[in-house]
Amino acid sequence: MDNYSGDFQSNGSGLKRHVNTVSLLLPAKQFSLNCSWTTERPLPAIEEFSCKLILIFDSVTPFEIREFFGLSEFEFNGLLDSLLKKRLVEIDPEGLIKASSVLRLKSNGGQGVPTLTTYSIREENVIFDMLTLSLIPRRNYQGVKYGLPEIPPPSKFGSVNIESIVEEFGRQYRAHLDSTRGGRADNTRLYKVSHCRPVRTVQVPIDMEIYLDVVPGEGVRVYRDVVERVGDIRKHALSNELEAQVADYLASLSIPENSFSFNDFCEAIGDEVLLNYVDSKGFDFASWLSDRDKRKTGYGSSSTRGILGPVYLPTNARTIYRSLGEAASEHAEDVPNAYWYSASVPLWGASGTDLENFVRSFENELSSSADRKQNLVTLFNIQDSSEIKTVKKAFNARLPHGVSIRDGSPQDRVEILIVPGLLAVAQYHVQPNSNSSVTVPVGQITTDPERMEKIGRLFQSRIRASSGSEVLWSNNSSHNESLLDEELLGLELKSGKGINTAPSKVNKKESVIKYKTSRER
C-alpha cells in the first residue's frame, strides 16, 4: 500500500489508472535580464555561391562574377558591397576579388561557407522557480490559480543572488528561446548578460497527476507526474528535482484522524460492495482495483456504480452529467440546488482547470431543466471562526457559493455531493501512500431512491448537529433563502442577518427527506 514511484515503468498489471490531479502554486520570481544575442542566418543564395566560386578559383575578376550570374553592373555593385561589408571578400591591388581571412578560416575549419552572424541586444523577462532555480516558460495562467495550495518558499527565497540567476540562465537559456523564439531558436546563442534585476514574486500553477497500479505481491503502487499545463490539452513536464520538492511538500501535510472509519462509512450508506474490501488497514485498495478491472464490483443495477477519484476528474464528471441529465428528464418538478459537503483532507478541491470546468458544466446541467438558474452550494463545517478566512481564501474564487455550518460534526474524510431526489455521490478519501497527503476518493454514484435516502441521512446527520449557518460568499449575491433548503438541511431561516439557526432536536428527527421511487415519479 505504501509503494511509491516517480516514473512510469510499471511491473504491475500495466493498467495505470488516473485517480487524481492535484494543482499547486509554485513559488517563483520574475527577473529582467539585458542580454546580448548572436544569431546565425544563411547567406542569400547568390552570396553563398559567389563565395564558393571565389574559394574554388582563389580569385576572380569582377567581369567573371557578372558573367557567371548574368548580373547588370548595378546588381553586381550591390553584391560586391554586401560581401565587403560582411568581411567575406577583399579586393587586391590588381582589382581581383579574393577570399578574406574570415572566409578562409571558416572553409579550412570544415564549416563551409560562413553564415551571416547578427548581433542584437534584448531585454528578456524570465521566471525561475525558487525551489530548484529552474527556468519556467511564461504562460497565460488566466484566473484558475487563485486559492490553490501554496508550496512555501524555502528559507533562501529572499537571498538568491543575482550572480546565481545569471549563471542559471546561461545554463538554461535554451528553454527560454524555445518558448519565445520558436523555429529561430536553434541558430541563436547567448553572448553575454550585462544586467539582471528582480521584478516581482509570482506563483506558477502546476499539476501533479496521480496514477495507481496493482503490483502482484506488493499491493498498490502510486505513480506521480508533475506537469505545467499549456492550454487545455498540452502539458509541459517539469524536472525530476522539482518533482521531488513537490513530493516533499505533500509529505509534510497532515491527514485528519479516522474518527469516522471506512467501515463506518460503508455501513452508513449501505454499500455492500465496498464492505467486502474492508480490512485491518481500512480498505483493501489492491483487491478492489483488481476486481474492478474484472467488472466484479458492480451494484447489480445501472442506477448505481462505483466511482474512483474526485467528482471533477473528467471521466467522473461526464458520468455525473449523464446521470443527472437522465434523472432530471424524468423529474416533474424543478431541479433543486445541489449541495456539496466537503471533506477535511488538506488537498480537497485542490484543482485548477478540472474543478473550474466541472462547476461550470454541473451548474449548466442543473439549470437545463429548470425555469431559473440553480446553484451548486458547497458546505464547510467550521469549528473555529478563524477557519472562515482560510476557507474564503482557498475557495471563493473557484466555487460559486460557500456556506459555513458552524459547530457541526467535525469534518473528516467523508465527501458528499447531493441533488435532492435526483442524484447522490458519497465518497471516502483513502490514503494509498502513508508518506503522502494525497488522497483518492472512493465511493458510489447513485440515482436509486433507497441508496439516495441513505446517503441523505448521512449528509443530514453531519449538518444537523450545527448551531447555525452563514453564507460566506455567493457569486450572484444569493441569500440563505435561495441557497439553503430548510427541510433538507434542518436549518430554520432567519431573515435580515444572513444567518441560519438550527431547529430543536425534535424538528431534526421529523424532517427526514423521503425519495420517490421511479414508479412514484
Image (tube, grey):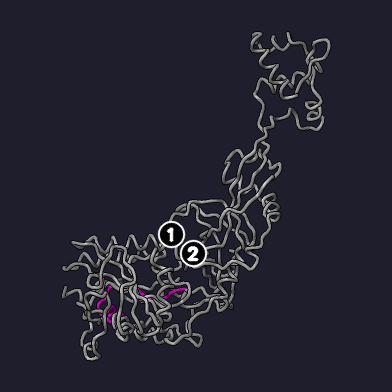
| Residue situated furthest bottom in the rendering | 506
Residue for badge 1 = 144
| Kind of residue at badge 1 | Val
Percent position of residue 461, x then y: 31, 85
Q: Please identify the quarter of the rendering in which residue 249 is found.
A: bottom right
**Alpha-carbon span between mark 2 and mark 1:** 10 Å
Residue furthest right as drawn:
93
Q: Which residues are magenta?
A: 440-455
Q: Is residue 454 magenta?
A: yes
Q: Nearer the viewer, residue 416 or 142?
A: 142
For marks 2 and 1, the one nearer the N-term is 2
User: Badges 2 and 1: C-beta atoms under 8 Å apart?
Assistant: yes
Q: Which residue is mark 2?
A: 23
Q: Is residue 504 above or below residue 332?
A: below
Q: Residue at x 18, y 61 (%)?
A: 371
Give the quarter of the image for residue 237. bottom right
Q: Estimate the x, y position of residue 103 in percent, counting from the top left.
A: 78, 26
- Kind of residue at badge 2: Ser
Q: Tell me if residue 77 is in the magenta stretch.
A: no
> Going by the image, does 338 lie left or right of 72?
left
Label 2 environment density (alpha carbons within 10 Å; few <14, some 14–19, many ≥20) = many
User: Which quadrant of the rendered structure holds the N terminus?
Assistant: bottom right
The residue lying at 21 percent from left, 81 percent from top is 514
